[in-house]
Image (cartoon, grey):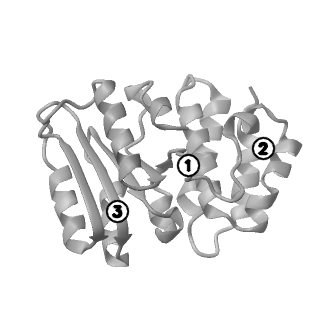
Amino acid sequence: MDIHDVLLSLETMHHAYLAEGGAETAEEFEEALRTSGIIQERSPDTYVRVYEQFGIDDARAVRERASRKAFTGRNIFILTITSITTEAQNALLKTLEEPSPNTIFFLVVRSADSLLPTLRSRVQFLGTGKSKGRGTVDARVFISAIPSERLTMLTSVLEERDTTSAIALLSSLEEHLAAKDRRDVSSRRALKAVYTARRYIADKGSAMKALLENVALTVPRV
């Protein structure tokens, strides 16, 4: 999934996205958002910042800004972060766990592995050519495969306990399932399995194998 896929439908947009990169990646996001008409020039609801060191005061400032009502109906945050303290990550996590209505975050970091697993679990990964984990699984291929093939695809993720790739897959599956008819029982059951996996997979000592295998066996094949 890349920024252009995200912009296809505002109704299905997640509240927070993450990509690896730097200023150029953030500029790409901002340009795509302007081209799509989601943000306007000099909009007071667009918060674009570059941080060499993102600290607790920065996290508090972002939280306070996110709590404000948007003049144009939607608050957009594009934050480029080179380094972030653990204290700031925990503060930012609280903001992402309790997102304000009509607020969307785009976080650009040098390496997703530098973030706490709990923070990574609250965002959807955007592909920029750099943000794929070691054992990245293509969600489209995963959905079209039979259960036994899906389990094989998860082998490297499980062997390396590659949380980054696992969360990236779950994010893509969540997006796919959220777009389906909510009256479909199998889709609702699968979405619940994905939500559960996303919630616990980053926890220390989590049963990653059981969580991902449950998703592999529950998501309907298309």
Percent position of residue 209, x then y: 75, 62
Looking at the picture, which amino acid does disc 1 mark?
Tyr
Residue 31 in view (yes/no): yes
Alpha carbons under labels 3 and 2: distance apart: 37 Å
Q: Is residue 13 left or right of residue 179?
A: left
Q: Secondary structure at mark 1?
A: helix
Residue 96 disc label = none
Instruction: Please tell me whether residue 49 is drawn above or below residue 160 in the rendered image.
Output: above
Looking at the picture, which amino acid does disc 3 mark?
Ile
Residue at 24%, 65% in the rendered image: 59
Residue at 74%, 68% in the rendered image: 160
Alpha carbons under labels 2 and 1: distance apart: 15 Å
Image marks 3 and 1: residues in contact by CB distance under 8 Å:
no
- Most extreme residue toward the right, as rendered? 148
Residue 195 disc label = 1
First along the sequence among labels 3 and 1: 3
Q: Secondary structure at mark 3?
A: strand
Looking at the picture, which amino acid does disc 2 mark?
Leu
Residue 217 disc label = 2
Residue at 51%, 38% in the rendered image: 2
Toward the viewer: 204 or 53? 53
